[in-house]
Image (spheres, helix red, strand yellow):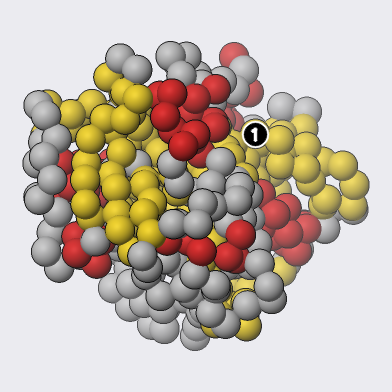
Amino acid sequence: MKHNPGSAFNVPCRPGPLKIRHRVAGIIVRGDGLLVTGYELNGGHFYSLPGGEQRYGETAVRALARELAEETGCRSKIGPLAYVAETYFADPYDARPLHLVGLYFRAEIDGEPRLGFASPDAPEARIMTEVRFRDRGTLSDIDLYPDGLGDVLCADWGRNLPGRYLCLPATENMLGGCVTGTMPRSAGDIRPRGVAIVVEDGKVLTTFYGRDWSLPGGEVEPNELIPEATARELFEETGLIVEPQRLLFVNDNVTCSFFTDPVWAPGGLHELGFYWLCRVVGGEFDPGPHIERSGEIEESLRHYWRTPEELKELPFYPEWLTGELERGMRDGWPPGARHLVSGDALAP
């Protein structure tokens, strides 16, 4: 998408390390109107769907309810996950390169939105100029961030489609070789994780950590997309080459009560897991052991094919996963991506 001359995104990207930003937003429709927030920055104007950054230890749904209250002054009802959208762009605030991971939920608000409720400490509060319903027919006339989302929303208008993954085009100011590396993760960062669901002959490929069991996968690096990270991690751990076919689950997993890492997560871990149904297309299976290191912790991983019945007898995480695998393998997988929570995130 080529931005108009008055766009805030026309500021050239500054060289710097690429970092991941997690954002939640609400798709709020009334008739032919879509609720948007407008901003003025760098002498230009742009729009986004109402929402903001997800905080460490805060589930996406809670984060969105908080953001909608701050930006519209209204109570909200958060519906199902509509899109997981990834893109690269330069932050209009400081023109630094970002990898955006956005979770977009269908939502409703109670009452009429009013400008002026955004937190005064939030950077966007100082540049927000409007919050209102904008007619569907005018969405193509504005700079709606991120690029490409407006076209998807218009194409899906009025259709109750299941949640799905979107890879949106990088904005123009992201080009030009400005990425100088990647920003290392630090304590207090949400950890995005790509996870593979691989099923063959009634069994699912699992990972044994010496004490606990889970599905194979690993951390998403800032310079790779979530499905790319999922395939990379599975190959590194098992030697299998897979093709991620469909995103099935997004899991907010807050595990502060039983998981700590003295370097990366001294107070626990907030992991945002993206579970992909994958198809094996090559490679040679190597069950391990494989050695992985995180901070001062060293783990020996082994991989096994297990039936859902066998998994019921094992300490298998996250809590909801065994039941979903059993239903999916028996009745077919859900039609779209769903958002789930586990660990301490289940607490009221």
Residue 92, position as x, y percentages in the image: 42, 66
Q: Residue at x 78, y 58 (%)?
A: 235
Q: For this view, does 179 lie left or right of residue 138?
A: right
Q: For this view, does 199 lie left or right of residue 209?
A: right
From what the image shows, is residue 194 above or below residue 261? Answer: above
Q: Residue at x 9, y 26 (%)?
A: 111
Judging depth in this view, the residue of 112 and 5 nearest the camera is 5
Residue type beneath disc 1: Arg
Q: Is there any visible trace of residue 3 in the rendered image?
A: yes
Q: Is there any visible trace of residue 192 in the rendered image?
A: no
Task: Determine whether the residue tagged by mark 1 lies in a helix, strand or loop.
Answer: strand
From what the image shows, is residue 313 above or below residue 210? Answer: above
Q: For this view, does 96 lie left or right of residue 197?
A: left
Instruction: Mark 1: give few (<14), some (14-19) or many (20+) Cα within 10 Å.
Output: some
Q: Residue at x 62, y 83 (%)?
A: 180
Residue 295, position as x, y percentages in the image: 50, 83
The quadrant in which the C terminus is found is top left
Residue receiving disc 1: 246
Judging depth in this view, the residue of 333 and 257 nearest the camera is 333
Q: For this view, does 317 lie left or right of residue 310?
A: left
Judging depth in this view, the residue of 136 and 330 nearest the camera is 136
